[in-house]
């Protein structure tokens, strides 16, 4: 799932290009982290809802930039403050280790367990080593966790303690802030499942050519049934995101000029909230940003690099 990648809470799910940041291998101690919305839900960081989110390392999401290399049996322990209420009885814990983009799970085994003595503590243990070999396997850049906690009843900023254990140079403690909202937010995020989980972000394309992969998005609305989600053209070259024909958001571009063409889906995908856009470069080299946003909700930014032939 991109990143998104928060960067989530009225920012982006893919993250900004931070090429001047040091790589994880050059860091002493754990990387700084932020907490972002899980790309397929709109409730994970909302008050009184079960917690589900991404812990995103503060490093570039560009797959050419190395992430964290982790040794076998490294562990990451998340300790939630008292405002989070543990669920009673058996809970369904879930997670994913991510290269930094949605649906880009790292294929190594791991476990997610809740501390019996302290049910506000959840530990992810990585059974096999993770290497950092950009661009296809850039290393660990985000951890998705669904825990056995209910979010606080009051919106606000809550610190979550994070400890890297047996993680080599990254071992140590840090803190990430969970921004809990009063209600669930409309969520739009990159959806890489239609292309074998390949990263649709950070593509390179020649002037006059189309990007190799179309851009797929998943729209998740908190207060509506699975209504039909489609796209409509705007006079400025952007696109309207439509729910049952009514605009609820937009897709626009920033930076060098690129054209956007919507691909119509059948009713099955449309009811699931899936939309798809192809991108074609024009004549000027440089970076283009594709900015998808929902009214009153989240924003997703995808980066396209246009190069001369």
Image (cartoon, rainbow, N blue to C red):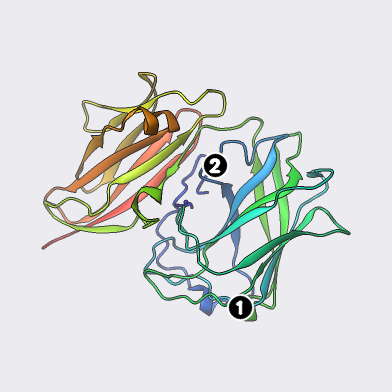
Q: Quadrant of residue 264?
A: top left
Relative to 205, say whether 136 is above or below. below
For label 2, the SS is loop
Disc number for residue 9: 2
Residue in view at x 64 percent, y 75 percent? 29
For label 1, the SS is loop
Residue 66 position, x and y percent, is 44, 72
Report how many numbered discs are placed on residues in the image. Answer: 2
Residue 23 position, x and y percent, is 48, 73
Q: Nearer the viewer, residue 109 or 291?
A: 109
Residue 78 position, x and y percent, is 72, 59
Crowding near the residue tagged with mark 2, few <14, some 14–19, many ≥20 C-alpha atoms within 10 Å: many
Crowding near the residue tagged with mark 1, few <14, some 14–19, many ≥20 C-alpha atoms within 10 Å: few
Dot 1 corresponds to which residue? 28
Horizontal side, residue 95 vs residue 294: left or right? right
The mark nearer the N terminus, 1 or 2, is 2
Residue in view at x 62 percent, y 80 percent? 169
Q: Quadrant of residue 160?
A: bottom right
Disc number for residue 237: none
């Amino acid at each position: 799932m991109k990143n998104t990648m928060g960067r989530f809470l009225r920012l982006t799910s893919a993250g900004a290009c931070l090429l001047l940041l040091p790589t994880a291998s050059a860091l002493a101690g754990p990387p700084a982290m932020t907490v972002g919305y899980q790309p397929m839900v709109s409730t994970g960081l909302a008050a009184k809802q079960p917690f589900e989110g991404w812990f995103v390392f503060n490093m570039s999401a560009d797959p050419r930039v190395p992430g964290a290399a982790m040794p076998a049996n490294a562990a990451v322990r998340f300790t939630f403050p008292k405002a989070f209420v543990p669920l009673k009885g058996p809970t369904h814990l879930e997670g994913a280790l991510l290269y930094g983009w949605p649906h880009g799970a790292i294929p190594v085994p791991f476990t997610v367990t809740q501390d019996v003595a302290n049910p506000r503590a959840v530990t992810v243990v990585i059974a096999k080593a993770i290497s950092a070999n950009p661009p296809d396997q850039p290393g660990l850049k985000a951890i998705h966790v669904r825990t056995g906690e209910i979010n606080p009843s009051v919106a606000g900023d809550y610190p979550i303690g994070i400890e890297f254990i047996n993680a080599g140079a990254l071992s140590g403690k840090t803190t990430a802030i969970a921004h809990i909202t009063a209600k669930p937010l409309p969520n739009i995020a990159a959806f890489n499942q239609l292309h074998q989980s390949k990263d649709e972000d950070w593509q390179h394309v020649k002037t006059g050519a189309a990007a190799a992969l179309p851009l797929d998005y998943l729209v998740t609305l908190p207060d509506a049934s699975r209504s039909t989600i489609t796209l409509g053209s705007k006079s400025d070259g952007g696109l309207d995101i439509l729910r049952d024909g009514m605009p609820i958001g937009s897709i626009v571009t920033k930076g060098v000029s690129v054209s956007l063409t919507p691909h119509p889906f059948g009713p099955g995908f449309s009811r699931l909230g899936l939309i798809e856009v192809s991108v074609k470069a024009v004549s000027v080299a440089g970076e283009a940003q594709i900015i998808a946003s929902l009214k009153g909700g989240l924003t997703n930014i995808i980066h396209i690099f246009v190069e001369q032939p």
